[in-house]
Image (tube, grey):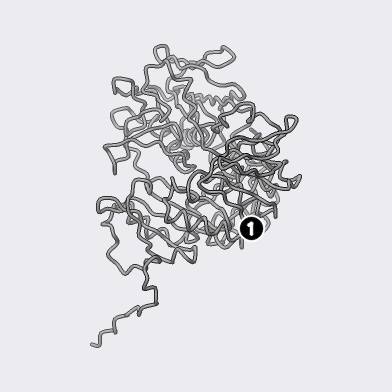
Amino acid sequence: VSIRILVDLNRCAAYGQCVFAAPDLFRLEHPNVLSWDYEAGAEHAEAVVRAQLACPVDAITAEITAMGDSR
Amino acid sequence: MTAEQHVVIVGGSLAGFSCADELRVAGHRGPITVVGDEPHRPYDRAPLSKDAAGGWIDAHRLRLAARSPLDGVTWRLGVPAVALHRGVHQVELGDGSLIDYDRVVLATGMRARSWPHPGQAALEGVFTVRTLDDGAALAAALRSRPRRTVVIGGGFIAGEVASVCRGLGLAVTIVAPEDALLVSSVGAVVGEAITSRSRSVDTDLRLGRRVAAITESGGVATGALLDDGSRISAEVVVVAIGAVRAVGWLAATGLDVSPGGIRCDHRLQALDVNGEPDIDVFAAGDVARWPHPCFPDRTHAVEHWGVARDQGQFVARQILTPPSQRTTFAAMPRFWSNQWGANIKSIGFPALADEIQIMLGSLDSGTFTALYGSQGRTVGAIAVDMPRELEFAAGLVTRQAAFPFPGAVIDARATNRAACPARFAARPSW
């Protein structure tokens, strides 16, 4: 694992931009119910950053570790 | 206090983790120790009653993401703190070890309230939902497709777990003493709307009823006996009757601690029994009981994800601030829940209200924004499947705007529910 993702669902207003930016990691289960993968491989790093930048309410924290799991 | 001060954080969940992370984000270079009684690295608890219970995500893959590298943090996991010795600035752990601190953060959170009959609580097939291990066990039980699950309780966790069962196509019964779901958190008006949503997906509701006993055969749960004598046959029984604060270890500290939490001042510094703050001891999350500046006459301990995160981060900043310059924790509490396919969001203190006003949408449709008022001011708001619309209401709550809201209001309970003209004013001609 080299990416950890946390979404602040108090901030999240289900705009769905992360789903467009990184459809492998984020999905809307219902119109206003977001689900996502907490952990992902390094190949998703670009998509995660895209999702972070696309989020209109800055709800996404992504921890990207260059050398894999360091803690 | 030097920049090298040792911060000891007791509690390895969201509040404690957020505090450690924020300390590093803010540039603290000194040692940090995080003590946690669970053996797992900090993880997100919220999905345990939702996606993780349903098996849609793995309960073991919920680690919290940090914003800092979190270097130089010592993790003392799998061992509880058993005492705080303020005089000598030490935390004592269950294995007898003592940790010296310069500042300590009390963030031990809550544990699930156990079923009051220990013999029944210990039966195979009886679950609570609080820890990662709880969540993984419940997910495994639901994966085996029980013929029916009984959920005891009418709060958020109960609703979420029952909703997951229906999402998996599993039969589920909720038994709760209240007449509607979520009543204590959102009141009966909104509670009834949520209850309708649960009914629409064929949830068996036994409201106004109590479980007299969890029934068993050979040490395995077989269902529930209700107080009206009826029996429900079930292979899985989920006890979701609330949580209790993990503050027993603070009994002999001289701090003002009760089952209602650790009493703090507005800066989240813990108060002693004489009401004096200990400037080296902070509390954050479920255990912190503090006066919100909008309601200075009372203290609140709020059991929300967002409060744990906000207070953990806030306390980190306080620790790095000289005591005379520390500030007030003033964030409005927010929470969310996902159940019955709906997103429920809240801001403020709805439970302090006596009146409610449907501001947008309608109760019948199950999609609405409600304002909560008390003594002429807006004290809270709840949005069901209106996460974006909540933000307008949030502004009213934050500035404690006049209640009821003076704008045009559609009250879904009113008899006259016909659409009425929006009455846009004609553009002025020049």
Q: Which residue lies furthest to the left in this view?
A: B430
Q: How many labels does the image show?
A: 1
Task: Please report the residue visible at 26 percent of the width from the left and 37 percent of the height from the top.
Answer: B297
Residues B337 and B101: in front is B337
Reply above or below: B408 against B99.
below
Residues B414 and B403: in front is B414
Q: Can residue B169 be seen in this view?
A: yes
- How many C-alpha atoms fall within 10 Å of the one at disc 1: few (<14), some, or many (≥20)? many
- The three-letter code of the residue at mark 1 reads Ala
Q: In this view, does B153 lie to the left or right of B170?
A: left
Residue B214 lies, in percent from the top left, at 64, 35
Residue B424 lies, in percent from the top left, at 32, 80
Q: Is residue A52 left or right of residue B251?
A: right
Residue position marked by numbered label 1 in the rendering = A22
Residue B352 lies, in percent from the top left, at 34, 46
Q: Can residue A67 be seen in this view?
A: no
Q: Is residue B372 left or right of residue B174?
A: left
Residue B248 lies, in percent from the top left, at 47, 22
Which image quarter holds the C terminus of chain B?
bottom left
Q: Residue furthest bottom?
A: B429
Kindly indicate the quadrant of the structure image that contains residue B298: top left
- Judged from the image, the secondary structure of the residue bearing numbered disc 1 is loop
Which image quarter holds the N terminus of chain B?
top left
Task: Please report the residue visible at 56 percent of the width from the left and 61 percent of the height from the top.
Answer: A17
Label 1 chain ID = A
Residues A41 and B138: in front is B138
